[in-house]
């Protein structure tokens, strides 16, 4: 099953419908009805389904279908063909997170054979890798069409460890509009690049300030244990002797659950207003525009959460972990579900060239799904 799923080139820039159609046909062959939730262009779709009785209290297993690009990476094998070597299964998405998806689908025959007392629901999303954009519409549909699950398990790679918290992820796009003049007369112009540089410097300063602060006890499990701000892409200017008219860059904020994500956005916007006001003293048509690209809510540790208790019971783990990367878990939790993250593979392999998942991790995941099925029999 993993071999088949890896073969679908579901890079976020492209459609995932070939893979979704395969899953839908596969489920249909077992008499399972599934439901699709499309994007506006009908080029991508989420899929959700239910196996077992139409009652509350079941388990929802969640995974995303999209993968990150391979461009610029040095692969030693075909990224979209599963290769086994020395106990590892290589292929784009093998770890993040088609490994978990394959475990779910491979267990469908077992789910159909046993007598489920509570349902098992499955949810496959699109565009997780570009800001968890696809899942919210599907979650809204699930809430009104399926009985409420007692636990949602998001199978992102955690080495089958129990993860009960992650940071909020905020993506912002900033456009700085300046005023072009010859650089010898730069005092009459407004450089979009140099003013963008002020914003980038501010971003760096905030991260350094956060790093220097005393770590709160509830944040010690995060790596790193503080809120980070990062500019990953920047582009601007036309020539070395012209004050740049335009500059655009992306800002990524990874906010601790104990801090207000809205407050961080407001803080950035307020500083941008100060820089904008300085720009407009030279040219009133200069401006700074900030656009929200994505917002992925953090996952909060739950007090006496059923999902955590269930997963810890099955994995026999006393400890929980927290991660800095974002997932769809926070979106399920915001919708009122008890949610946890647990899946095969290491996040260190995700997005890398020669991405792989250990066969042993896949076997652990197989046992985990088997025990989950038993828990609702």
Image: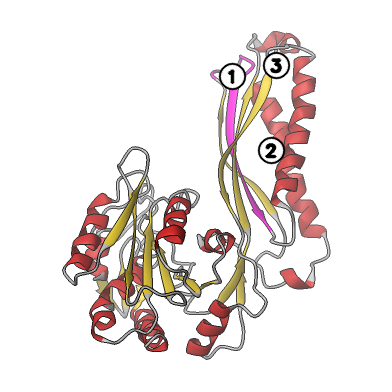
Viewer-proximal residue among 36 and 367 = 36
Q: Dots 2 and 3: beta carbons under 8 Å?
A: no
In the rendered image, residue 290, in percent from the top left (x then y), is placed at: 63, 32
Crowding around mark 2 (Cα neighbors within 10 Å: few <14, some 14 to 19, many 20+) is some
Q: How busy is the neighbourhood of tag 1: few (under 14 within 10 Å), some, or many (20 plus)?
A: few
Q: Label 3: state its secondary structure.
A: loop
Which x, y percent locates residue 246?
Answer: 59, 21
Characterize the local packing of mark 3: few (<14), some (14-19) or many (20 or more) Cα atoms within 10 angstroms: many
Badge 1 element: loop
Q: Nearer the viewer, residue 278 or 30?
A: 30
Residue at x 46% of width, y 68% of height: 156
Residue 81 appears in the rendering: no
At x 30% / y 79%, what residue is drawn? 86
For the C terminus, the image quarter is: bottom left
State which quarter of the image contains the N terminus. Answer: bottom left
Foreground: 61 or 220? Answer: 61
Q: In the visual, does 372 lie left or right of 307?
A: left
Disc marking residue 227 = none
Q: Residue furthest front?
A: 55
Query: Residue 273, percent across and down?
Result: 76, 28
What residue is disc 1 on? 240
How far separated are the C-alphas under marks 1 and 2?
Answer: 20 Å
Q: Which residue is mark 2?
A: 200
- Which residue is tagged 3? 190
Q: Which region shows up in magenta? A: 238-255
- Give the x, y percent position of residue 274: 80, 28
Magenta run includes residue 89: no
């Amino acid at each position: 099953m993993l071999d088949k799923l890896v073969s679908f080139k579901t890079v976020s820039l492209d459609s995932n419908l070939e893979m979704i159609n395969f899953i839908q046909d596969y489920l249909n062959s077992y008499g399972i009805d599934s439901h699709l939730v499309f994007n506006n262009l009908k080029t991508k779709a989420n899929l959700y389904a239910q196996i077992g009785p139409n009652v509350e209290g079941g388990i929802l297993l969640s995974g995303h279908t999209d993968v990150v690009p391979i461009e610029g990476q040095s692969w030693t094998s075909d990224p979209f063909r599963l290769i086994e070597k020395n106990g590892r299964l290589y292929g784009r998405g093998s770890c993040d997170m088609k490994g978990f998806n394959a475990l779910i689908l491979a267990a469908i025959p077992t789910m159909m054979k046993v007598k489920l007392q509570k349902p098992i629901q499955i949810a496959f999303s699109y565009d997780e890798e570009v800001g968890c954009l696809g899942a919210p519409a599907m979650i809204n549909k699930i809430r009104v069409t399926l009985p409420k699950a007692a636990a949602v398990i998001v199978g992102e790679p955690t080495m089958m460890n129990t993860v009960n918290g992650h940071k909020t992820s905020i993506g912002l796009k900033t456009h700085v509009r300046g005023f072009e003049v010859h650089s010898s007369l730069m005092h009459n112009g407004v450089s979009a690049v140099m003013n963008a540089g002020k914003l980038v410097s501010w971003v760096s300063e905030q991260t350094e300030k956060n790093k220097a602060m005393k770590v709160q006890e509830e944040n010690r499990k995060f790596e790193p244990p503080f809120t980070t701000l990062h500019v990953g892409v920047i582009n601007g200017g036309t020539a070395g002797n012209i004050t740049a008219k335009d500059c655009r860059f992306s800002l990524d904020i990874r906010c601790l659950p104990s801090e207000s994500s809205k407050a961080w956005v407001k803080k950035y916007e307020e500083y941008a207003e100060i820089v904008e006001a300085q720009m407009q003293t030279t040219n009133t048509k200069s401006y700074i525009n900030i656009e929200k690209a994505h917002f992925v809510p953090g996952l909060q540790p739950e007090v006496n959460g059923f999902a955590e208790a269930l997963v810890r019971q099955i994995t026999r783990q006393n400890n929980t972990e927290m991660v800095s990367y974002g997932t769809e878990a926070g979106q399920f939790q915001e919708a009122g579900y008890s949610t946890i993250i647990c899946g095969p593979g290491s996040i260190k392999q995700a997005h890398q060239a020669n991405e792989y998942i250990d066969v042993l991790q896949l076997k652990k995941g197989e046992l985990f799904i088997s025990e989950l099925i038993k828990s609702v029999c």
